[in-house]
Structure formats: C-alpha cells, structure tokens
Image (spheres, rainbow, N blue to C red):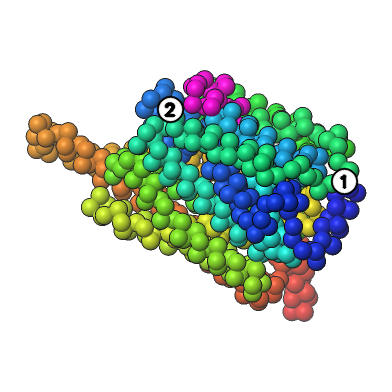
Amino acid sequence: MSQITNLKSQTTNRTATPFSMPMFREWVPKRIQPWIYILQVLCIQFSCGVYLGAMEAVRGTTALQLEDLLMLLYAGLAGMAVWFPMLFRMKFRFTNQQLLITSAVVIAVCNFITMRTTNMAILLPVCFLAGVAKIQGTFECMSNIQLWMTPERDFGIFFPILHIILLTAITGSAWLAAVVAFHLSWQMMHVLTIGTMAFVVLVQLLLCQPWCPMPQRMPLKGIDISTGLLISLLMLMISYILVYGDRLMWFFSPTLRWILALSLILLAFILYRLKTVEQPYISLEIFKYKNVLAILFVTAVAELLLGAEHTLEEIYWTEVRGLEEHTKGALCLWSLPGVYVGVLITLFWLGHKRWKVWKLFAIGFGCILVYSMWMYFYLDVNVPIEQYRLGLAFRGCAYAILAVSLMWSLHESVHDLQHFFMALFIFNVIHMYLAGASGYGLYTTLFKHFMADNMARYGDYLTLTSGVNLSTFNSHLSTLTQSVMSVTLKQIFGQIIWVSGFMTFAFLLLDIPRVRTGIEKVPYWPVYGIKMLARLRTSKAGG
C-alpha cells in the first residue's frame, strides 16, 4: 500500500515534466510514437473471443446456439472486468514489452482456438483469457500515452478521449466481423486478428525496448488470486442463469435452481474471504466512499435501458425486417456519429467548463428517451431502414455521455489509486457484464410474455371461421406474426420510455439547489408518531 501511495505522489510530481516515451528506441521519431501506440490499442480493442457481427454465420456453420455464443461473449467481458485490480500490479512488475507481447500472443492463440473448436468446455476459459489479455494490453498502451493526451492528468479530458477509442472499436469490430463473414467466412475475422496481433509483436520487437516505470519491481506476492478466481467463477454462473434462463424456463429448471443455490453459497464464501483476508482482492471499504453506491445504481439502470440495443433491435432487424448481418452492422455504424457528439459534450462539460454532473446525467438519459421514442414511433415494416439512423445516433450519444460521466464520477468519489481500480472492477462488472446479461434475460422474457399475450388476442384473425383461405394461410400467418412482433417491441420500448423519462426528470430536479439540499429529512415513523402524540397531548392540555 505504501509503495502505491509513494508512486502516486511521484506521478503527481511528474505532471510538470515533458512527455516522453522511453520504451521506444532512439531512432523512432517522437512525433509518431504516441500514434503508434494508438494504432496498437485499436488492434487490441478490435480483437475478441467471439465477434458480435459474425454470430449468425457461426450459428449457421456450427452446432452452437445463440445462448452459447452470448455465454462466450460474457466470459470475455468477465475476464476484462475481473482483471482491473491486477492492472497496476502487472505494470509495476513487468516491462512494457513483456506485457504487450504476452497480451498479443494470448489473444492470437485464443483466436486460433476459437475458430478450430466448438467445445464449450474449451471455449469458455479461452474467451475468458482473451478478455484478460485484451484489458491488460489496452491499459498498458493507454497508460503510457496519458500524459500526451492531458499533461495535467485531467480525467475530464482523458476519459472522453479513451472512450472514443473504446466505443469506435466496439461498433467497428462488429461491423468488420459482419462484412468479413459475408464476403469470406467468419473464420477469416480470427485470421485477421491474428495478423494484427503479429503486427503488435513486431512493433514491440523492432521499435521498442524493455522498460518499466518502477526501478524496483513490485512483487506479485500477497495477491489474493484465489478469491479473484472464485469471483470469476461466480460471474460465469450468474451469466449462465441470465443467458439460459428464458430457454430453460428459468427456475422451473432443476439445473438453474442448483446453479442459483451454488451461486449463493459461493457468494457467501467470497464475502467471508473479503472480510477476513488481510489483503483482499476487492476491499469492501470501497462502498464506504461517498456516492459509490449511487453511481453503481445509476450505472445498472443505464445499462439495463441500453440493453435494448442487443436484444430488441436484434429481434426487430432479424425476425421482423429480415436484414443480413452486414446490413445490420452498416446500419449500426450510424451510432458512431452520436458517440462522437456525446464524447465532445462530456469533454466540453467535464474537461473545459467543469460543470456539475447532474445535468449531464439528465442529458444522457434524455438521449435514451429520444432513442426509445424514435424506435417506438418508427417500428413498422413499411418504414425505410434509413429512418432509424437518427435514433441510433441518439443511442450512441447516450452511451458515450453516461459511460464517460459515470466513470468520471467514480474517479471523483474514490481518490485512492488502489481503491479506484478495485472500484473500476465493480463498476465494469455492472457496466460491461452484469447489467448487459440481465438486460438480455429481462427483455427476452418480456418479449416472450407480451408476444404470447398478443398472439392470443389477435389469433382470431386466423381462425377458419374468419374466412381465411387455407391456401393463403401461411402468408397471413407471416404477416400477422410480423405485426404482432412490432406491437410487442413497441410495448417494451414503451416501458423504456417511462423509466428513461423518470430518470431524466429526476436528475433535472437534482440539479436544482433547493431540491438537492433544502429538503428536510423525514424522521423514522416511530419518532414521527411520538412527536405527533406529544402535539396531541399539548393541544388537549391547552384546551
């Protein structure tokens, strides 16, 4: 702990020194050094164990179902989230060259394995390791060019620029995987990733030299890695329940009941270890920081609302409109202009003006409100798909604003460097992983419920007594199903409108000083009753 505290003071004093990258060889021009690292981080961020844009192609050529692929996707996200407390320890123990070469090699090997096997027992740990390598490589690149982005280490500037890279890679990799799968095959995306990882290795071997910011390497002793592994196992068990829940009829399934029981036992054991171990993997003191619980709650609500992107949009594009993967990917690229607008808003708000964050939250949830209303009113098979571009841009803007502002708020609340990365772990468990999986389980269940109800209501249209000719029965059934799906999606988007509207209104009220600070706290009900009884006795005595 003392080493990290001393390091924090050293890095604070370094803000006045000119930016340099000592890991590069002397003959490499200094102007292009940061851009080489940006190119490397884009290569790493475009990598994945399973690619969203190629899911339909994978399902068509293998025995893997959609739930299996989502499970692999969340395994990669779990690996990324659980490794956050280890990032600085690894940076202060190994050289820059060792970390980036290892990350690139691990990602390349994982991509080679994922395109050669369909065994879930092998794919799950492979995707998990790919997520670990991806976040380690990303952190190593971005931490070395942070002073180039903001010499004062202003996170109101750094976080928006960071999310330009992250969100571009998330959307761009899905589109690129869809295009490659359409024109070639889904395996070629993995081959392309292996090629980009070879580029990262060559850059480190030819242009860079071993360098570590710690003169005395920090040892890896004392890390509670066993608890970290148990947390990883718990995350995978929870994602299994949420992803396969609708398919297995939730807790009517004995398998899910057993997994839930084991998850609760494992959770209790993890909490016990976190309280008793001298240096726990995650310190529970994080929750004592001001506003941390509120930030995590807002993050969960925002991710649940934005989960409509992965579930409701997928149902609409695929089942109702019948779009191909590359067409869906090209359409979703229209969220990127919204992402860049949202990043510019947060950069101006937090980095330049340094205004309070309440109203920025309201703008983010307001963009979700506009997106959900746009989808609600334009959900129709006769509407050209170009009409959805503005709505998708608002969705991207909402994601950028909320992701940046919530991470910035977490940094402002948790000042200790070691605790901040532990808090980032919990934040990203909700931000990248848990809320997304919960959203998938929630929206698929709601869709199934509303769809069955609507088919029961409108099914009389296809009864023989209504005069439907048997020869045209199939066409009528297809038309009815598409119409009922559209109605069902509108119902769910309607719920999103109510929740996002409430969150927008709530944060606008919190921005009003009188509402935020001038409300008297309501006492406990027994106290209130005793005071009321005393007033009654006083009034009777006076009477």
* Camera-nearest label, 2 or 1: 1
Q: Amino acid at mark 1?
A: Pro
Q: Earlier in the sequence, mark 2 or mark 1?
A: 2
Seen in the picture, residue 399 relative to 353 is either above or below; the reply is above
Residue 241 colored in magenta in the image: no
Q: Residue at x 34, y 56 (%)?
A: 388
- The answer to which quarter of the image holds residue 412 is bottom right
**Could one spot residue 498 in this view of the protein?**
no
Residue 129 colored in magenta in the image: yes
**Closest to the observer: 129 or 213?**
213
- The answer to which quarter of the image holds residue 108 is top right
Q: Residue at x 86, y 37 (%)?
A: 219
The residue wearing badge 2 is 65
> Which residue is the extreme one toward the front?
27
Q: Amino acid at mark 2?
A: Gln
Disc assigned to residue 215 = 1
Helix, strand or loop for disc 1: loop
- Overall secondary structure of the magenta section: helix
| Mark 1 Cα-neighbour bin, 10 Å: few <14, some 14–19, many ≥20 | few
Q: How far across and how far down the image is residue 225, in percent? A: 77, 32
Q: Is residue 449 left or right of residue 382?
A: right
Q: Residue at x 72, y 67 (%)?
A: 521
The magenta span reads: 112-131
The number of numbered discs placed on residues in the rendered structure image is 2
**Could one spot residue 473 in this view of the protein?**
yes
Q: How far across and how far down the image is residue 34, in percent? A: 65, 55
